[in-house]
Amino acid sequence: MRVQVADAEVYIYTNNKAPDPDKPSVTFVHGAGFDHGVWTLFARHFSRLHWNVLSVDLPGHGRSGGRPLLSVEAMSEWLVSVLDTLGISETALVGHSMGSLISVETAAQHGDRINRLVLIGGIAPMPVSPPILEATANQPSTAHSMLTSFGFGKANLLGGNPNPGMWMVGESMRRYEDEASDALDTDMRACNQYNRGLAAAATVSCPTLMIHGDADRLTPLKATRQLLAALPSGRIVLINGAGHTLMMEAPNVVLDHLKAHLIDPAQ
């Protein structure tokens, strides 16, 4: 569906259903240089369970208009504006990479509206190396190759997509190439500059699940310790052999963890 937020048209994948404020909701937030399409499997599943699913395209990404936002804080406030526009007073948040930072910031600033949190491939702080920033600014195709190469577990770079006939590496490259030319660079700089992630995490009151690949080379496993320690109600699950792009590498395992955390009241 398309709505107007801050004078720009926003695209939100809802599985062709209008949000119902009386139903439980889950909002998916993509990572740097990506769009709503990385969440399609998960959004469709929760829609079949009669949840509202809101898979957003951030400004200047995918099918959303406007310019890419310059900071994680601005992206968080924009996300809340989307929820306001749709009349959603409470939701679970699922964020990947940069989306995990946006989700932490949103849960910290608007804790009364976020009932569960899932951080996929998330760390805080989330520094970006100078070679990657140089590439995103001046050599986008090189940046796409670098991020794709480091974004998957080594075994998955050779194939291994659980969906027959699909190539994870090629899909990742196409997603980067389809975005606006400055979106990835803007996103990477926002991640690099966001320095209040641990302080924000310390104020998050809702149950929080971190999902991480033990072969992640973009946000290494050892870097999760600070964020996990900061979260008052946080826990982590690891996916063996998976890298940073978990939604492509291990979609069924990720979905199982999402269902357990979002639906099972014992979690």
Image (spheres, rainbow, N blue to C red):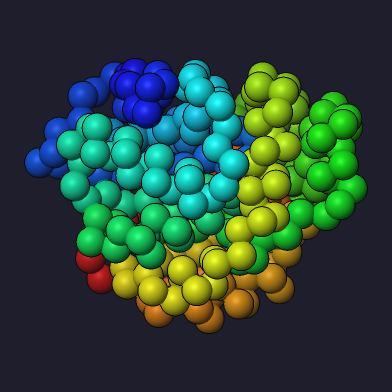
- Residue 144 coordinates in the image, percent (x, y): 80, 33
| Quarter where residue 45 is shown | top left
- State the quadrant of the C terminus: bottom left
Q: Compared to 92, does 172 lie above or below?
A: above
User: Seen in the image, is 160 located left or right of residue 251?
Assistant: right
Count of marks overlaid on the render: 0
The x and y percentages for residue 188 are 70, 45
> Percent x, y for residue 64?
47, 22
Image position of 142 with respect to 119: above or below? above
Looking at the image, which is closer to me, 160 or 63? 63
When asked about the image quadrant of residue 138, the answer is top right
Q: Is residue 122 left or right of residue 148?
A: left
Give the quarter of the image for residue 111. bottom left
Front-lying residue, 77 or 166: 77
| Residue drawn at point x = 43 percent, y = 48 percent | 76
Work out which residue is located at the far left of the displayed protein and give it: 22
Q: Is residue 46 visible?
A: no
Say left or right for 187 vs 228: right
Residue at 39% x, 46% y: name it.
77
**Quarter containing the N terminus:** top left
In the image, is 262 to the left or to the right of 265? Answer: right
Above or below: residue 205 compared with residue 213? below
Whether residue 144 is visible, yes or no, is yes
Write the residue at 82% across / 35% down.
Answer: 137
Q: Residue at x 67, y 60 (%)?
A: 126
